[in-house]
Image (cartoon, rainbow, N blue to C red):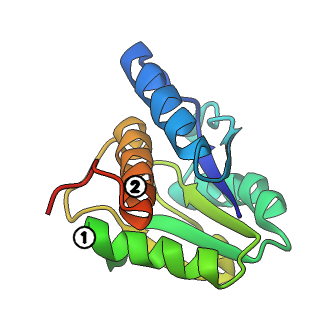
Amino acid sequence: MKITLILVGKTEKDYYVKAVDEYSKRVSRYCKFEIKVIPELKNTKSMSVDVQLQKEAECILPLIQGVQEVILLDENGLEFNSVEFSKFIEKRMTGGQRDLFFVVGGPYGFSDKVKSTANAKISLSKFTFSHQLVRLVFLEQLYRAFTIIKGEPYHHQ
């Protein structure tokens, strides 16, 4: 299985970059893993939210076209604890999924067009996180899910 994480905008703070790199390496021990970064929009102060969502969609949609399963990280999505999320991932692994794409949107989320192409939406928390922090939290949970699946001692019950 290959997991791809699509991000709108690059990770900027050095401490986030280092942590994202570390957890990306850890996840790569369990599956093929890739991060694709869509450049952040410029001059957004002069754009409406709808225009921003449309422009981001124009960048996201070609990357997810024909993908077997697309999951949006969205505040209105399903919430899991770590064990439940590991079962979510394991089900896809054992079900023969070739490609699994997770998408982190821009500051206003996703256009309706992107939402309509997704197979599922997952929420990391009822809290609101910065897009920089969401990347790290998600990658840590993905790594944790793999260690739970493999019975490794990272996660404690």
Classify mark 2: helix, strand or loop.
helix
x and y, in percent, of residue 120 in the image: 53, 80
Q: Is residue 118 visible?
A: yes
Q: Which mark is residue 147?
A: 2
**In the rendered structure, which amino acid carries the disc numbered 1?**
Asn
> Alpha-carbon neighbours of circle 2 within 10 Å: few (<14), some, or many (≥20)?
some
Query: Relative to 150, does residue 81 appear above or below in the rendering?
Result: below
Residue at 41% from the left image edge and 35% from the top image edge: 132
x and y, in percent, of residue 17 in the image: 48, 23
Q: CA distance from mark 2 to mark 1?
A: 14 Å
The residue closer to the viewer here, 80 or 83, is: 83
**In the rendered structure, which amino acid carries the disc numbered 2?**
Thr
Rendered image quadrant of residue 155: bottom left
Of mark 2 and mark 1, the one earlier in the sequence is 1
Residue at 53% from the left image edge and 82% from the top image edge: 91
Q: Which mark is residue 81?
A: 1
